Amino acid sequence: MEFKCKKDECDGDCSSYLISIVNEVLENGECIVYPTETLYGLGGDPFREGMIDKIRRIKESPSDKKISIAYSDLDHASEFLELPELAWELGEEFLPGPLTVVIETPEGTEGIRVPDHPLAQSVIDNFGPITSTSANIHGRPAPREVKTAEIQLDGKVKLYVNCGRCELGQGSTVVKVGDELDILREGVISEKEIGDKIGL
């Protein structure tokens, strides 16, 4: 099912009707395709048993492919994770925005995303954390428009939230932090920008 948002909903004034639809889909263990400032994302309840594997199957990703989680901000993320100081420094400069911060956890690593998109934020504010990974088949182009996701994920996703063309059209920059910072993927934010802001 596709839900084409009105302009004010894409700008963050989400109707209770839209939020109720999204919540129902997520609470039932289904997935949504939702807009961010970078690309359309594939969202599900990350704490529901089997959801991460379900996301991998939808995307036809390798079984060891990590799936990031979107939060409303780093304070929200810190309710679930212990964040290193460097993550807070990056958050102060770049979040919300097109940066994924990867940290070490007792279970391995986790990517943290804080999308700078009002509708994505509304979904997270109302439902809670959701998975954050591009809504495409592994190895195929990531979708800047919802139609691309619909074509690739044909029949695999319950709800597509259509807010038009994503503003940036490029993946987030991915950095791993601990005692030091490692750029895993350069995206919208350049390595130089990060270095200039936090003195690397």
Image: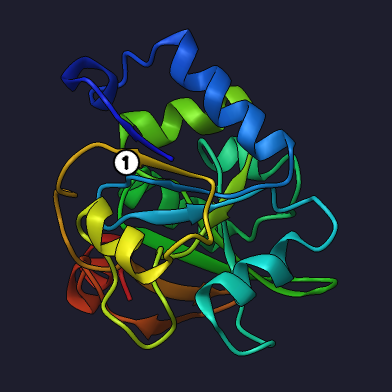
Q: Is residue 1 left or right of residue 37?
A: right
Q: What is the crowding at mark 1: few (fewer than 14 residues within 10 Å), some, or many (at least 20)?
A: many
**Tally of marks:** 1
- From the top left corner, tell me how far across and down residue 124 is, in percent: 54, 33
Q: Is residue 143 left or right of residue 184?
A: left
What amino acid type should be assigned to the residue bearing mark 1?
Asp
Q: Residue at x 26, y 72 (%)?
A: 195
The answer to whether one can see residue 3 in this image is yes
Q: Which quadrant of the figure has residue 7?
A: top left
Viewport quadrant of the C terminus: bottom left
Q: Is residue 129 above or below residue 10?
A: below
Callout 1: SS: loop
Q: Is residue 133 left or right of residue 39?
A: right
- From the top left corner, tell me how far across and down residue 160 is, in percent: 40, 44
Q: Which quadrant of the figure has residue 34?
A: top left
**Camera-nearest residue between 38 and 148:** 148
Q: Residue at x 44, y 74 (%)?
A: 175
Q: Is residue 180 above or below residue 22?
A: below
Viewport quadrant of the N terminus: top left
Q: Label 1 belongs to which residue?
A: 116
**Camera-nearest residue between 143 and 107:** 143
Q: Residue at x 28, y 19 (%)?
A: 9
- From the top left corner, tell me how far across and down residue 118 is, in percent: 33, 29
Q: Is residue 193 left or right of residue 182?
A: left
Q: Residue at x 45, y 25 (%)?
A: 122
Q: Residue furthest top?
A: 16
The answer to whether one can see residue 178 in this image is no
Q: How did the renderer colour the structure?
A: rainbow
Q: Is residue 164 above or below residue 113?
A: above
- From the top left corner, tell me how far across and down residue 78 is, in percent: 68, 44
